[in-house]
Image (spheres, rainbow, N blue to C red):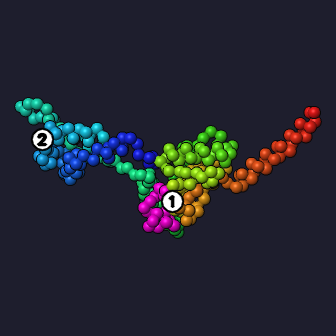
């Protein structure tokens, strides 16, 4: 799950606003081997000291790493410390506004290719794998006594969970819980039928894993940013209203008898 970019990730991207620092980072990315401060300064056209200042800044924000030498630091007879050598950090930093979940989509597609059953359609395999992944996520986040949650509490819990998972949920007054934008954009513009089915299956799995029977995941094509909605299950709502009515009907004679 990729959450919304945190302060460290934003700071890493912001550090590249400096043109010299950006040039240093690009040069390191193109280098086949780690580089020293002197080598970087020569390549970029600045002093060794200034190169060190920018390199250490890039290390602090997580874009560049220091080489960990496997060989002895110095040969016999040499004096002083071995020069620091820098290389791009792995895996780097990725920031997206609004948050996207491309890694989840890639994981679903790769697993569905590896676990596709004989005679199973590719789209069905992807939906099945996506639902299984959502089920695991929901079970991991399952609240205590989730089965007894009413629609209002369940929707509030789901909204908080989606925020923690990096989604961008919104909910009109007394309306369904929607997604402000598609978490799988821009792939959803290439084949919306397949991508929307995968996302719907994932959210249905999350709801199933949470064991909140009062909520259902619905696929509503053409509803704006994302065609998946989370809404109160009308059957569960009807059962709750019916149970409340029966309770009131039973308690009323008792109250009359007590007078």
Q: Going by the image, does 71 lie left or right of 174?
A: left
Residue occupying image coordinates x 44% and y 52%: 98
Residue 111 lies in quadrant: bottom left
Residue 161 shows in the view: yes
The vertical placement of 253 against 94, above or below, is above
Q: What percent of the width, then of the height, locates residue 199?
A: 52, 58
- Closer to the camera in the image, 145 or 132: 145
Magenta residues, start to end: 181-195
Residue located at (51% from left, 59% from top): 225
Q: Give the side of residue 179 with respect to residue 94, left or right.
A: right
Q: Which label was assigned to residue 47?
A: 2
Query: Around disc 2, counting alpha carbons within 10 Å, would you say few (fewer than 14), some (14 to 19), or many (20 or more)?
Result: some
Q: Position of residue 255 (x, y in %)?
A: 89, 36
- Quarter of the image with the C terminus in it: top right
Mark 1 highlights which residue? 225
Q: How many marks?
A: 2
């Amino acid at each position: 799950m990729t959450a919304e970019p945190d302060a460290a990730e934003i700071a890493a991207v912001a550090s590249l606003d400096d043109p010299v620092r950006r040039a240093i980072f690009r040069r390191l990315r193109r280098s086949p081997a780690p580089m020293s401060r002197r080598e970087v300064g020569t390549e970029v056209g600045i002093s060794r000291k200034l190169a060190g200042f920018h390199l250490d800044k890039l290390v602090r924000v997580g874009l560049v790493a220091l080489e960990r030498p496997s060989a002895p630091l110095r040969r016999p007879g040499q004096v002083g410390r071995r020069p620091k050598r820098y290389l791009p950090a792995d895996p780097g930093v990725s920031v997206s506004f609004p948050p996207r979940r491309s890694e989840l989509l890639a994981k679903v597609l790769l697993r569905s290719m590896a676990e596709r059953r004989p005679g199973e359609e590719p789209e069905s395999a992807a939906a099945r794998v996506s639902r299984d992944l959502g089920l695991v996520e929901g079970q991991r986040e399952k609240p205590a006594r989730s089965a007894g949650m009413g629609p209002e509490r369940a929707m509030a819990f789901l909204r908080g969970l989606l925020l923690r998972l990096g989604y961008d949920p919104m909910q009109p007054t007394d309306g369904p819980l929607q997604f402000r934008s598609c978490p799988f954009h821009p792939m959803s513009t290439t084949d919306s039928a397949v991508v929307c089915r995968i996302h719907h299956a994932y959210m249905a799995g999350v709801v199933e894993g949470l064991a909140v029977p009062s909520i259902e995941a619905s696929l509503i094509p053409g509803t704006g940013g994302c065609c998946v909605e989370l809404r109160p299950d009308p059957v569960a709502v009807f059962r709750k209203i019916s149970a409340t009515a029966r309770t009131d009907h039973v308690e009323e004679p008792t109250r009359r008898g007590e007078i």
